[in-house]
Amino acid sequence: MDDIQYARAVCQRHFSELGQGKINWRGLELGPGDGLYSGLYAKVFGASQFVMIDDGNYANLNLDNYTQLLKNLASVSSNNTNNNNPPRLVDILKSLDVHYYTNGLESIKNLPDSYYEFLFSNAVLEHVRRGDFQTLVKEMWRILKPGGIASHVIDFRDHLSGGLNNLRFSRKIWESNWFAAGSGFYTNRY
C-alpha cells in the first residue's frame, strides 16, 4: 500500500461497499502495511474518523511520500502550517482524526464496542496467526456497529510461490515460531 494509485484503487473497491455519498462514517483498516494512504483516502470518501491497525510499525512516515496526496486535501494544508516548520505526517493524521496503532490484536481490544460502521482489510486476514484468528473475528464483530459493513479481500494464493507449496509442510512446522513469526510468508491456511 505504499503506492498512491494502488492504495486509491484498493480504497475505492472497499469504500464502494458503503454506498454512494455516505458521509460521517467511522472506519477501520486492518493491516495498512507500509503506507497510510487509506486513512487519508477515507477522509476524501466521507469518513469522520478512521483507524488503521497493524501488528507492528511498518508504515513509511516520510512526509515526502504523502505530498502528492496531501495536496488534494485542502484542509491539511490550511490546518497544519506552523510558522516555517513543515507539517509532520503524524500531526496531519491527528488533525484529520486518523489514527495509526501498531499493537495488533491488543490495539483492537482497546477500541469501543459497536463503534465503527465500516471495517476492511486487503490481503491481511490470511496472515493472522491461526491461534489469534478466532479472537480477531470476535473483536471485529464486537467493534462493528449493528448494521455495519466489513469488506475483506483474502489472497488465497500460496505466498511462497503462488501455488500450494505451503501445504507441503506439517501443521506443527508451519505453525512454529520460525515459520509463523519469522519467515515473512506465513499464511494461516484457513
Image (cartoon, helix red, strand yellow):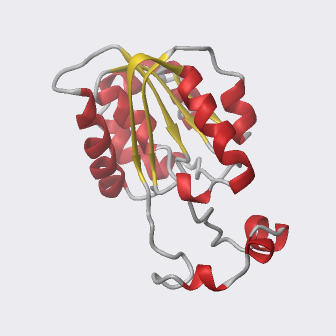
Query: Residue placed at 56% from the left, 47% from the top?
Result: 31
Q: Quadrant of the C terminus?
A: bottom right
- Check the image and name the residue furthest to the right: 177
Q: Does residue 97 lie above or below 167 as drawn? A: above
Left or right: residue 125 compared with residue 184: left
Q: Is residue 14 left or right of residue 111?
A: left
Q: Nearer the viewer, residue 156 or 110?
A: 156
Please tell me which residue lies in front, 83 or 71: 71
172 with respect to 120 (left or right): right
Percent x, y of residue 45: 28, 29
* Residue drawn at x 69%, y 55% as measured from the top left: 130
The quadrant in which residue 119 appears is top left
Residue drawn at x 56%, y 85% as measured from the top left: 165
Return the residue nearer the eye: 90 or 6: 6
Total marks placed: 0
**Depth check, front residue: 86 or 34:** 34
Q: Is residue 1 above or below residue 55?
A: below
Residue 19 figure quarter: top left
Quadrant where the N terminus sits is bottom left
Counting from the top left corner in percent of width and height, residue 157 is at: 45, 73
Q: Name the spot of residue 173 as percent of width and height, x first.
A: 79, 77
Percent coordinates x, y for residue 53 in the rendering: 60, 38
Q: Return the residue found at the far left.
A: 20
Instruction: Name the residue at 53% across, 35% down.
Output: 86
Q: Is residue 180 visible?
A: yes
Q: Quadrant of residue 107?
A: top right
Q: Reply above or below: 70 against 1.
A: above
Q: Is residue 34 visible?
A: no
Work out whether 92 lies above or below 79.
below
